[in-house]
Image (tube, helix red, strand yellow):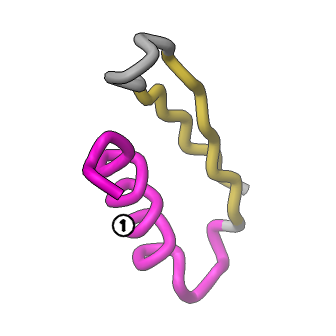
C-alpha cells in the first residue's frame, strides 16, 4: 500500500484541509489514479 497526503487551502474561508489517497502499489491504474488525485486537489479553488 502507498499513501499520498495533500493539504489544500480554501481561498474563500481561509481554512486548510487534509486529504489522503491510499491505494495498492499493485493497482494497474496507479499512475492514472495519482495523476487524477493531484489534478483534483490542485484544482480545488477553481471556479465550479
Which residue lies most toward the bottom here? 28
Judge left or right: residue 47 versus residue 18: left
Name the one closer to the observer, 38 or 26: 38
> Is residue 28 within the magenta segment?
yes
Image x and y of residue 7, in percent: 47, 26
* Mark 1 closeness class: few <14, some 14–19, many ≥20 residues within 10 Å: few
Q: Is residue 17 above or below residue 4?
A: above
Residue at the disc numbered 1: 35
Image x and y of residue 47, in percent: 27, 52
Q: What residue sits 70% from the left and 53% below the top? A: 22
> Is residue 34 within the magenta segment?
yes
Q: Is residue 17 above or below residue 38?
A: above
Q: Is residue 21 above or below residue 23?
A: above
Image x and y of residue 32, in percent: 42, 78
Q: What residue sits 49% from the left and 13% below the top? A: 15
For label 1, the SS is helix
Name the one closer to the observer, 23 or 15: 15
Instruction: Point out the stretch of residues depicted in magenta.
Output: 25-48
Q: Is residue 39 above or below residue 8?
A: below
Judge left or right: residue 7 versus residue 23: left
Image x and y of residue 21, in percent: 63, 51
Image quadrant containing the C terminus: bottom left
Amino acid at each position: 500500500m502507498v499513501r499520498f497526503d495533500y493539504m489544500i487551502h480554501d481561498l474563500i474561508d481561509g481554512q486548510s484541509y487534509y486529504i489522503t489517497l491510499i491505494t495498492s502499489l499493485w493497482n494497474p491504474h496507479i499512475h492514472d489514479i495519482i495523476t487524477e488525485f493531484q489534478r483534483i486537489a490542485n484544482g480545488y479553488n477553481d471556479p465550479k
